[in-house]
Amino acid sequence: MTNAPPPFRVLVLCTGNSARSQIAEALLAVRGAGRVAAASAGSRPAARVNPYAVEVLRDHGIAWEGRTPKSIDDVAEERFDLVITVCDNARDACPHFPGATAQVHWGLPDPAEAVGALAARRAFRETYDALAARVDALLALPLEHLEPAALRERAQAVHSAPGA
């Protein structure tokens, strides 16, 4: 029996918890499997996960059907090593998440605002690609060994790194 360290806990927040935060949670869960425990929530959760988010994840081999948006209230009592806001509204609604060791902002345009199926698919692909680059850069960090200030600084730097 091994005494593996507990997974690094990441929470991703956006307004509706239906697009960006769901994609980021899925990427963290899959690419950080065994190392990261990912969750997501919204300040004003939508009724359902955006079907284009489910589609872009499925196109990349990630089954995400049947998920439902969660409220920040659903996770308010939990502790997280890192909280990432992916929209300005969530950052403004939750400038400091009480259970977070470190919090950063990766502001991205809302792909759900795209008009028409072709534009929406393109916007969701671009959002997926942007989040995948950030998640990969984040997972390349020694997350478990960084002090809170260094974690915040390096996780925020991921957002503005070339290719992210």
Image (spheres, rainbow, N blue to C red):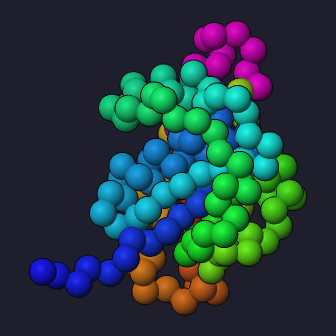
- For the point 54% across and 48% down, the residue is 24
- For the point 71% across and 49% down, the residue is 71
* In front of the other: 116 or 48: 48
User: In the rendered image, is residue 124 in sight?
Assistant: no
Q: Say whether residue 34 is left or right of residue 21.
A: left
Please provide percent x and percent y for residue 54.
50, 27
Against 29, residue 47 (above or below) is above
Q: Say whether residue 156 is left or right of residue 89.
A: left
Please provide percent x and percent y for residue 145.
43, 86
Please provide percent x and percent y for residue 44.
80, 43
Against 132, residue 112 (above or below) is above
Q: Which residues are magenta?
A: 113-128
The image quadrant of residue 8 is bottom left
Magenta span includes 96: no
* In front of the other: 121 or 90: 90
Q: Quadrant of the N terminus?
A: bottom left
| Residue, far bottom | 147
The image quadrant of residue 139 is bottom left
